[in-house]
Image (cartoon, rainbow, N blue to C red):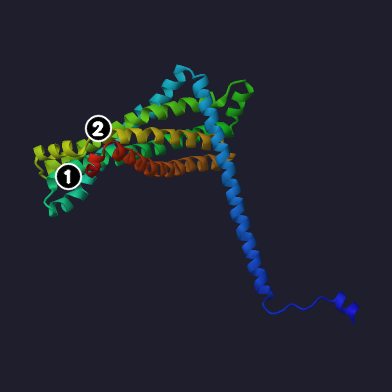
């Protein structure tokens, strides 16, 4: 009997199949999450090394002026029309959507202060950065991705030239220095558009409109928007160039790199906007506690 029992395993008990399936599902779930964390950690480390190499060349040896001016034109001058158009219509939309609520409270003359503060602190820099990520960031990722697929980046390395210095640093400088100018343009056109619609279409008194704007909007509001834009431009340049440098083979890889550059840049803009806004408001309340009620 003992030999028979040793050769013939015991029959499966009721419920064993369910427990086995649950165990397999849990093991697969843990494995998937572990793979996701491992992949994300490796990607974050690779991105950090890419940023470190870019900063190293930025402070070691700058690229040629011809390369820098070309990227400045593509990033700054070519983006002015779409940024100006976007800022103008956003100001008008804010006036349209805010007027009826303010009118019910009898505060329509304060519309200028609220709209202009919103444009300077939030919508101006965020919209300018979003347009830059969509127009310039995707273009940079696609261009660098095509160079990676066609082995032009490898050819630069084989010739003894550093691809990051010749390809990444000029684009980074263009985004870093020109996004504040694009933010100022978006702010100006947004304020002008809101003023035109509020005064000439909605009939708000011109004196009270600008008087309330002067009371509510301060230089710190303009500083907040410009300070945020510098971080937005840095994130757009680094993410777009990284996606282009790590593009997969084929036309599909270039398309994926272009799409990923915009998606990741937009998420980075929103996350940075939140944390920078919290930090800057805390600094303002610390330095000017008497002005906490004006924000």
- Residue at 13%, 49% in the rendered image: 107
Q: Which residue is mark 1?
A: 111
Q: Which residue is mark 2?
A: 219
Q: Residues within 10 Å of mark 1 (few under 14, many from 20)?
A: many
Does residue 249 appear to the left or right of 100 in the view shown?
right
Q: Is residue 31 visible?
A: yes
- Residue at 47%, 33% in the rendered image: 140
Sequence-first disc among 2 and 1:
1
SS assignment at label 2: helix
Q: Give the percent coordinates (x, y) of residue 95.
A: 20, 45
Q: Give the percent coordinates (x, y) of residue 117.
A: 24, 40
Q: Quadrant of the N terminus?
A: bottom right
Q: Which mark is residue 28?
A: none
- Residue at 46%, 21% in the rendered image: 67
Q: Is residue 55 above or below residue 276?
A: above
Q: Is residue 89 visible?
A: no
């Amino acid at each position: 009997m003992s030999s028979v029992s040793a050769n013939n395993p015991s029959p499966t008990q009721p419920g064993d199949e369910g427990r086995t399936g649950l165990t397999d599902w849990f093991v697969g779930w843990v494995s998937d999450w572990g793979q996701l964390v491992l992949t994300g950690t490796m990607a974050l480390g690779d991105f950090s090394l890419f940023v470190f190499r870019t900063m190293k060349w930025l402070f070691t040896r700058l690229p040629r002026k011809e390369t820098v001016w070309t990227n400045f034109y593509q990033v700054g001058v070519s983006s002015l029309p779409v940024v100006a158009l976007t800022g103008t219509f956003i100001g008008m939309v804010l006036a349209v959507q805010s007027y009826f609520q303010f009118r019910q409270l009898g505060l329509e003359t304060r519309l200028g202060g609220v709209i202009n503060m919103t444009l300077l602190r939030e919508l101006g820099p965020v919209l300018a950065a979003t347009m830059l990520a969509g127009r310039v960031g995707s273009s940079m990722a696609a261009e660098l991705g095509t160079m990676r697929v066609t082995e032009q980046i490898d050819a630069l390395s084989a010739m003894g030239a550093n691809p990051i210095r010749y390809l990444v640093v000029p684009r980074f400088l263009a985004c870093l220095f020109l996004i504040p100018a694009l933010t100022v343009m978006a702010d100006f056109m947004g304020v002008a558009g809101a003023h035109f619609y509020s005064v000439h279409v909605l009939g708000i008194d011109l004196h009270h409109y600008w008087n309330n704007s002067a009371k509510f909007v301060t230089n710190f509001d303009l500083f907040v928007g410009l300070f945020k834009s510098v971080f937005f431009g840095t994130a757009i340049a680094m993410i777009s160039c990284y996606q282009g440098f790590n593009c997969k083979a084929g036309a599909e890889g270039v398309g994926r790199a272009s799409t990923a550059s915009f998606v990741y840049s937009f998420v980075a803009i929103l996350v940075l906007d939140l944390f920078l806004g919290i930090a800057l408001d805390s600094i303002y309340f610390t330095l000017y506690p008497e002005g906490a009620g004006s924000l």
